[in-house]
Image (cartoon, rainbow, N blue to C red):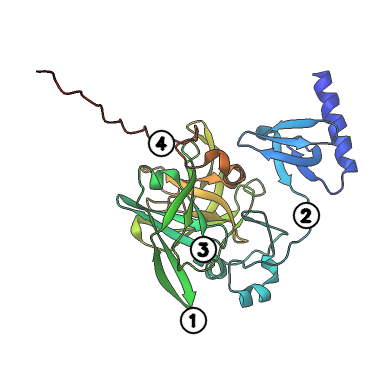
């Protein structure tokens, strides 16, 4: 115990010297500063210079990342003109998806839906319907694994904004890029030849949200496309089936699965995936920390028959057996 206390004290002291480092606020009001190496569902690994500390999430109150130099502007959730006028919605683009570069202003649900609603899509298969959201302009999108489980024929409906109105466009060339059955996450890509550059969402942090804060979801519950529901974050650590979920009073129904749960700055903080059927206001979402881990390590979850993590394995077809002619 004494050794553990000494290590934590040394780490806290080291954190004071790292003004530009990521900061992890502990529940005992201490803080650890360093470079976050990995974020997992149950722990965070931090490089503090002379060693790597693994901190259980149960001991963490808040995670604050150091601001990185702002990258050149990219096409964001709104049109280029709207993005130029909307400086509060600044973002920094990672190599594959976008994170908020600074604290965005809190807005009304109506304003946010107008700004980011185009990036929320419907995912259709022969056996059902779900939701999803586009994460970069090249047409990569997130949804739940159970939305496309066992399916190879997938289409995505996108609502493009033209002349102030939304026009539905169906894309049918959809490729499965990666999937994680256990976290219920799937990465898809729209590959239609006539596909434009897509509007996309910014992926925020569920850890930065506090219980009681307002959130809202966009999806297609029961096939009612582009339905918006609002509520609060009830808890960030609801344990179901051995995993931790965000619980929200925002109404979640079949068809919402795979859709985004937003904070009031328009950042995705969860992927809605289930509800308790015998109650109201009991919806659940996968925290974005799990989503970012999945995206950052998507090659490990690549949809390939050679990947041992792939939930589906296809056997080679049997070869034709040669039967010699029977002798007379």
Residue 121 in the image: state x and y as whole percent: 45, 60
Upstream in sequence: badge 3 or badge 4: 3
Alpha carbons under labels 1 and 3: distance apart: 17 Å
When the figure is inspected, residue 267 is found, relative to residue 326, above or below; the finding is below
Residue at the spot 58% in from the left edge and 70% down from the top edge: 78
Which element is circle 2 on? loop
- Residue 312, numbered label: 4
Q: Is residue 264 left or right of residue 314?
A: right
The local crowd at label 4, few if under 14, some if 14 to 19, many if 20 or more residues have their Cα within 10 Å, is some
Mark 2 Cα-neighbour bin, 10 Å: few <14, some 14–19, many ≥20 = few
Q: Rounded to the nearest whole Å, what is the CA distance between mark 1 and mark 2? A: 36 Å
The vertical placement of 260 against 17, above or below, is: below
Looking at the image, tell me whether mark 1 or mark 4 is earlier in sequence order. 1
Q: Secondary structure at mark 1?
A: loop
Residue for badge 1: 163
Q: Nearer the viewer, residue 145 or 320?
A: 320
Q: Secondary structure at mark 4?
A: loop
Q: CA distance from mark 3 to mark 2?
A: 25 Å
Q: Is residue 237 visible?
A: no
Is 196 situated above or below 272? below
Report crowding for label 1: few under 14, some 14 to 19, many 20 or more residues within 10 A (C-alpha).
few
Locate the C terminus and report the quarter of the image it occupies.
top left
Disc 1 and disc 3 in contact, CB within 8 angstroms? no
SS label for mark 3: helix
| Residue position for label 3 | 119
The residue positioned 70% from the left and 70% from the top of the image is 87
Mark 1 and mark 2 in contact? Answer it, CB < 8 Å.
no
> Which comes sooner in the sequence, label 1 or label 3?
3
Q: Which residue is mark 2?
A: 67
Whichever of labels 3 and 2 marks the residue nearer the N terminus, that label is: 2
Which x, y percent locates residue 135?
56, 57
């Amino acid at each position: 115990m004494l050794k553990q206390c000494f290590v934590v004290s040394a780490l806290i002291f080291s954190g004071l010297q790292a003004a530009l480092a990521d900061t992890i606020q502990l529940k005992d009001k201490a803080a650890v500063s360093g470079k976050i190496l990995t974020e997992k569902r149950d722990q965070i690994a931090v490089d503090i210079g002379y060693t790597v500390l693994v901190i259980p999430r149960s001991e963490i109150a808040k995670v604050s990342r150091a601001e990185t130099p702002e990258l050149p502007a990219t096409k964001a959730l709104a049109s280029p003109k709207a993005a130029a006028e909307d400086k509060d919605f600044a973002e920094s683009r990672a190599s594959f998806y976008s994170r908020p570069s600074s604290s965005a202003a809190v807005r009304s649900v109506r304003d946010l839906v107008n700004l980011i609603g185009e990036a929320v899509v419907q995912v259709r298969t022969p056996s059902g319907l779900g939701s999803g959201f586009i994460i970069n302009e090249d047409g990569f999108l997130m949804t739940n694994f159970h939305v496309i489980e066992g399916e190879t024929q997938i289409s995505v409906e996108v609502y493009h904004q033209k002349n102030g109105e939304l026009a539905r466009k169906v894309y049918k060339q959809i490729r499965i890029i990666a999937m994680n059955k256990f976290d219920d996450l799937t990465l898809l890509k729209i590959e239609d030849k006539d596909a434009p550059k897509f509007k996309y969402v910014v992926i925020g942090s569920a850890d930065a949200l506090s219980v009681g804060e307002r959130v809202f979801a966009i999806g297609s519950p029961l096939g009612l496309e582009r339905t918006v529901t609002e509520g609060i974050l009830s808890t960030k650590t609801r344990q179901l089936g051995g995993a931790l979920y965000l619980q929200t009073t925002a109404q979640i129904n079949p068809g919402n699965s795979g859709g985004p749960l937003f904070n009031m700055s328009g950042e995705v903080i969860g992927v809605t995936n289930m509800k308790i059927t015998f109650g109201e206001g009991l919806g659940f979402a996968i925290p974005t920390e799990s989503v970012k881990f999945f995206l950052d390590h998507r090659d490990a979850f690549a949809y390939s028959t050679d990947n041992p993590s792939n939930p589906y394995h296809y056997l080679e077809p049997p070869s034709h057996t040669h039967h010699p002619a029977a002798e007379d």
